[in-house]
Image: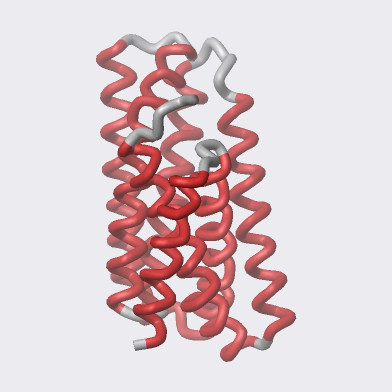
Amino acid sequence: MKPISKADLIVSLAGGIFIGGTLFDVWPEAARQIGVFAALLWLLAGYFGWWISKIALQKLKKPALPFLTATALWFHSILEGMVTGLAFGVSQIFGLFILAAMTLHILPEFFAALALMKGAGSTMKGSLATIFIGFGLLYASFGMTYWLLPDFEAALPKALALSGGAFLFVGVASFWKRRSLLNFVSLLAGIGVIFLQSNL
């Protein structure tokens, strides 16, 4: 039997925080402001938008042009930063949970992104530079979104529901590839943290 790594437990915990955030913070807030049906449509758009983004990134494992791979990674980082910033539209506490979960989520991705860039033909130096630029873009887009939140007004509930779909996808995808009983317990712990936070 394959041993469970600490990294898998941490990513599963982060996945639970994303799922819990969608179920107990983002979904109720968006449904209250724009209605259940509209919130569901935006949530599904976010989920499938991230799913399509994931497929596009997987397709870019084979091209010989590292630039295309780097661009895809950077675009993905910008989107993740934006949905993290939108979490602060629900509450400061919830936003901080999602920011922490996103940070935990991307740490193991460092090595996957490194392999992706090397596989696309990039040098080690170029691969590392691409990854650090990606992290910088993630936090920069988070900062810009957080700073501009008050200007969203009418669009904020739709953007929240869209980001909820992204959170849901990231949570499910983070756990799904490391399914095990112990990781499931870790996932439930993450969901429980958000459930407790939203009900206190």
Which residue in the rendered view is the most extreme toward the front?
A: 1
Using the image, determine if residue 33 lies above or below residue 100: below
How many tags in the picture? 0
Q: Is the image coloured rainbow, by chain, by secondary structure, or in one colour?
A: secondary structure
Residue 1 lies, in percent from the top left, at 49, 25
Is the residue 76 above or below the residue 58 in the image? below
Res 63 → quadrant: top right
Q: Position of residue 197 (x, y in %)?
A: 35, 79
Q: Residue at x 35, y 25 (%)?
A: 111
Residue 139, horizontal then vertical, whole percent: 29, 52
> Residue at coordinates 37% horizontally, 78% vertically from top-left?
196
Is residue 14 found left or right of 163 in the rendered image? left
**Which residue occupies the foreground of this view, 92 or 126?**
92
* 82 lies above or below 91: above
Quadrant containing the C terminus is bottom left
Is residue 42 rendered to the left or right of residue 180?
right
Residue 184 location (% of width, % of height): 49, 51
Q: Residue at x 34, y 46 (%)?
A: 10
Viewer-proximal residue, 116 or 27?
Answer: 27
Report the residue at 46% width, 25% height from top.
Answer: 2
Q: Nearer the viewer, residue 161 or 174?
A: 174
